[in-house]
Image (cartoon, grey):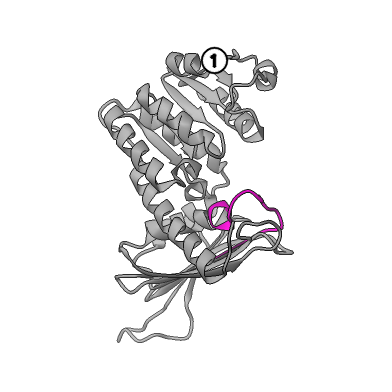
Amino acid sequence: MINIGIIGNNDVAESHIKILAKNPDVNIIGVTTCSGYFNNDLSKKYNIKYFTNIDALIEKSDSIDLICNDDIVIKLTEKIFKASKSIFVSSAFLNNTAKAEKLIKLADEANVNVHVSFIERYNPAYVAIKNYIENPLYIESHRLTSLYNKNISVVYDLMLHDLDLILNAVNSSVRKISATGMWSIAKTIDIANARIEFNNGCVANLTASRMSDTNIKKIKFFQHDAHITADLLNNESNISILKRDENNNSVNNNILITPEIEIINPLETEITSFISSISKTEDVDSNIEESYNTLKIANLINEKIKVSSNIVY
């Protein structure tokens, strides 16, 4: 049985509680807020002990589920690592390069399981096609919404999810990044487009916007002999495979594969995977450095947009 403490007091924290409460390997030891200010709404609703002291909750827990935003994430993550506790945390805490490098060192010294959440890896439409992705030559992603978080650049709010999928699909280092964008709703970047050229020749083009009339979450992988599409919003995927004759020449009719998609809760799958990694005693399972590399690319994209578009904030 793994004793897990939850730090957070919002709708996302509540969804985590619902998932963890169903897991037979988990005991929710308690909950507290990110700021430490008293608010026991979730505690009362789910009959979970409320800790008025964050340090006490960390001490009593084997692992911490940290659902907080902004700079408080960095401060709390450092505290959790110093206590040698495993952690499930959003990618927000890696946005500050200097502090992230310090946290990576602390995580390594603590020798604990660290899972930085990238939920789209567990999206059913992506899971259905990921085994078909092999040496993509060109990748195209569109993530458009009418909803927005005015406190953060769209690069981190939206584009980051597709960037993570792309970097995991391309087995190569980045050679060149070009990016442009604009802000309108708030004084952060609201529309972003990035072109990433990899050393193996692959090119990725990413578009993210929170000023769209329609919601779109699609990613396409173009390979030498296949075209793979995942609609991450509507849970639809298809693979079009180039058909060849006995002389290896292409013919008109491609082979269309529509993979069976298992409708799952991506967050539940991700959290369950984290719990499973804690249960393994032989190895430490951590994706913090991999996640940090993704955030470094996102930081470069964000800075290039600010320079190219004369955005100051």
- Image quarter where the C terminus lies is bottom right
Q: Quadrant of residue 289?
A: top left
**Residue linked to disc 1:** 53
The quadrant the N terminus occupies is top left
Q: Which image quarter: residue 192?
A: bottom right
Q: Where residue 193 sits in the image (x, y, percent)?
A: 54, 68
Residue 182: image location, x then y, percent: 62, 67
Q: Residues within 10 Å of mark 1 (few under 14, many from 20)?
A: some
Q: Is residue 251 above or below residue 86?
A: below
Write the residue at 37% across / 21% down.
83
Disc 1 element: loop
Nearer to us in this view, 153 or 221: 153
* Residue 85 seen: yes
Residue ID at (51%, 45%): 119
Nearest to the observer: residue 193 or residue 234: 193
Outermost residue on the left side: it is 282
Residue 259 lies, in percent from the top left, at: 51, 59
The magenta region covers 139-157
- Tell me the kind of residue under disc 1: Asn
Q: Residue 124 at x, y = what percent?
A: 53, 50
| 123 to 54, vertically: above or below | below
Determine if the magenta segment contains residue 144.
yes
| Vertical placement of residue 276 versus 170, above or below | above
Q: Is residue 70 magenta?
A: no
Residue in view at x 67 percent, y 18 percent: 40
Q: How many marks?
A: 1
Instruction: Inspect this view and state whether residue 261 appears.
Output: no
